[in-house]
Image: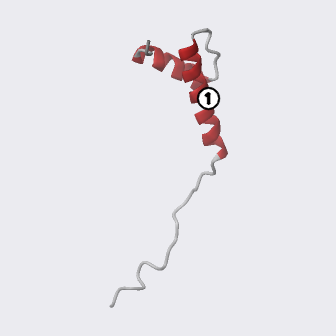
Amino acid sequence: MTLSSYRMHRIYLAATMGYGLGSDDPEELAYYKKLRKEMEDMKKDPVKKGIPLSFEINEGKDK
């Protein structure tokens, strides 16, 4: 049995807000754990801020 979009949304909200799931359904638990793992992985990735400066863009152009 697949999860309905309503149930997936409820699990997503619980995962993003840091709440427990409150369910013993293995399919719901797997989806919840998958979301929590993705969120943890996103926290580990560095965020690049600012505008990258590259002066090589105009090198090949003739004026």
Q: Quadrant of the C terminus?
A: bottom left
Depicted 1 relative to depicted 30: above or below? above
Left-right relation of 31 to 4? right
Left-right relation of 63 to 4? left
What percent of the width, then of the height, locates residue 24?
Answer: 61, 8
Q: Quadrant of the N terminus?
A: top left
Label 1: element kind: helix
Quarter assignment of residue 3: top left
Residue linked to disc 1: 36
What percent of the width, then of the height, locates residue 32?
Answer: 58, 22
Label 1 CA crowd tier, 10 Å (few <14, some 14–19, many 20+): some
Q: Give 9 or 52, whichever is nearer the viewer.
A: 9
**Tag count in the figure?**
1
What percent of the width, then of the height, locates residue 13?
Answer: 53, 21
Quarter assignment of residue 59: bottom left
Left-right relation of 51 to 44? left
What percent of the width, then of the height, locates residue 23?
Answer: 60, 9
Left-right relation of 59 to 62? right
Depicted 1 relative to depicted 42: above or below? above
Residue at (63, 40) in percent of width and height = 41
Residue at (58, 35) in percent of width and height = 38
Residue lying at the far left in this picture: please name it. 63
| Mark 1 residue type | Arg
